[in-house]
């Protein structure tokens, strides 16, 4: 399974006003006031700028008016979302229920393609490879049309294993790229990654050469989690009878998992003819990246920590 997964990864190119009770020491009125006291008038005047203006009147100790001034309250109008922001939200919303594109219908795919095309036409970063600070960091895959990743996303082959996250981490200082898939199972989580170097070939294009694969050390989960049933090869399998058995062997399995978790990750070199690819970035800002691969596939990635990742 590791060899198949690494091969698939090689094709993946890559954020009250409170009232304080009066203190007794301030209750008595001083005999001499260094400044006239300030009272707010009950009336509110209209500002020519459309902002609320308050009439402020200063009075002396005898209650006689000393001077008047108008204080304008600075109230900022709520910021309207830009057309690009609206398009980005609409695009991310269209991914809902598609499992990163695996289960997207033809109508949904057509809608996504149209939104991607509109965003690419409004790309704020004309030369992404010259804006390495924007490219730098971890990007979470939200959608792809690359069929090579669909076997990873499908639960038909591994019914008890779930793909938690597919990501691409770019180190712009060292010109490295890491593609990673995180899996979770009943007892542990693990990851399979590929490490690569990239070279800038044009303002939008980079050439990627994969160098090694890494199978992460399994990390023990708190307990065995078994679903009620799974679907395998078109058949629904009831797992309820297995829960009692698995509960009895959980301690033994946990001990084995702890032993495995203490081992270092397994690394192996990649030196085949399919170890190179190129990546064309067609849209880039601080939150969203749209890339196209050499097979014509499209990838939509969201920067780790972006509000776009929130449901």
Image (cartoon, rainbow, N blue to C red):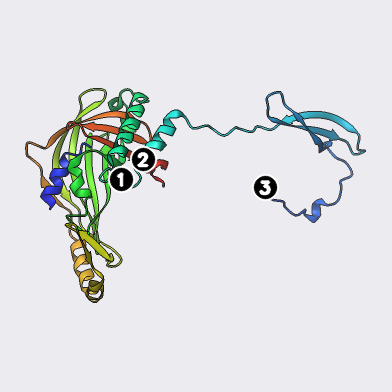
Q: Nearer the viewer, mark 3 or mark 1?
A: 1
Q: Do the residues labelled 3 and 1 touch (CB within 8 Å)?
A: no
Residue 49, horizontal then vertical, whole percent: 68, 24
Q: Secondary structure beneath disc 1?
A: loop
First in sequence: mark 3 vs mark 1: 3
Q: Residue at x 6, y 39 (%)?
A: 272
Q: Horizontally, is 125 left or right of 171 in the view?
A: right
Q: Residue 145 carries which label?
A: none
Q: Is residue 22 above or below residue 68?
A: below
Residue 34, horizontal then vertical, whole percent: 83, 37
Q: Answer whether residue 250 is visible to the viewer in this image.
A: no
Q: Categorize mark 1 by other alpha carbons within 10 Å: few (<14), some (14-19), many (20+).
A: some
Q: Categorize mark 2 by other alpha carbons within 10 Å: few (<14), some (14-19), many (20+).
A: some
* Alpha carbon separation for disc pair 2 and 3: 41 Å
Q: Is residue 95 above or below residue 21?
A: above
Q: Do the residues labelled 2 and 3 touch (CB within 8 Å)?
A: no
Q: Horizontally, is 277 left or right of 74 in the view?
A: left
Please give the residue where the numbered disc 2 appears in the rendered image.
94
Q: Answer whether residue 185 is visible to the viewer in this image.
A: yes
Q: Foreground residue, 187 or 148? A: 148
Q: Horizontally, is 154 left or right of 140 in the view?
A: left
User: Residue 302 lies in what quarter of the image?
Assistant: top left
Q: Are marks 1 and 2 in contact (CB under 8 Å)?
A: yes
Q: Residue at x 69, y 33 (%)?
A: 73
Q: Residue 17 carries which label?
A: 3
* Alpha carbon separation for disc pair 1 and 2: 8 Å
Q: Which residue is drawn at 39% across and 41% down?
A: 93
Please give the residue where the numbered disc 1 appears in the rendered image.
98
Q: Foreground residue, 127 or 243? A: 243
User: Residue 307 lies in what quarter of the image?
Assistant: top left
Q: Secondary structure beneath disc 3?
A: loop
User: Residue 71 lies in what quarter of the image?
Assistant: top right
């Amino acid at each position: 399974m590791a060899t198949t997964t690494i091969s698939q990864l090689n094709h993946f190119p890559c954020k009250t006003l409170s009232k304080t009770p009066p203190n007794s020491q301030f209750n008595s009125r001083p005999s001499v006031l260094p400044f006239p006291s300030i009272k707010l008038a009950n009336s509110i005047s209209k500002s020519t700028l459309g902002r609320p203006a308050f009439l402020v009147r200063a009075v002396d100790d005898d209650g006689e008016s000393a001077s008047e001034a108008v204080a304008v309250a600075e109230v900022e109008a709520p910021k309207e979302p830009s057309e690009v922001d609206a398009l980005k939200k609409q695009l991310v919303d269209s991914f809902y229920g598609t499992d990163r594109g695996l289960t997207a219908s033809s109508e949904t795919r057509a809608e996504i393609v149209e939104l991607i095309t509109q965003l690419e036409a409004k790309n704020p970063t004309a030369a992404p490879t010259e804006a390495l600070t924007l490219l730098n960091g971890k990007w979470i895959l939200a959608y792809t049309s690359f069929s090579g990743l669909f076997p990873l996303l499908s639960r038909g082959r591994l019914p008890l294993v779930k793909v938690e996250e597919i990501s691409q981490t770019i180190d712009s200082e060292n010109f490295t790229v890491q593609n990673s898939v995180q899996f979770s199972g009943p007892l542990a989580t693990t990851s399979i990654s590929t490490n690569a170097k990239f070279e800038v070939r044009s303002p939008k294009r980079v050439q990627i050469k994969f160098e090694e694969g890494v199978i992460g050390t399994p990390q023990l989960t708190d307990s065995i989690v078994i679903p009620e049933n799974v679907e395998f090869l078109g058949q629904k399998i009831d797992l309820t009878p297995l829960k009692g058995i698995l509960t009895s062997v959980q301690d033994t399995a946990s001990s084995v998992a702890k032993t495995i978790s203490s081992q270092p990750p397994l690394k192996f070199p990649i030196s085949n003819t399919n170890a190179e690819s190129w990546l064309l970035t067609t849209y880039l800002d601080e939150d969203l990246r749209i890339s196209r691969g050499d097979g014509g596939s499209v990838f939509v990635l969201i920067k780790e920590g972006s509000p776009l990742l929130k449901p």
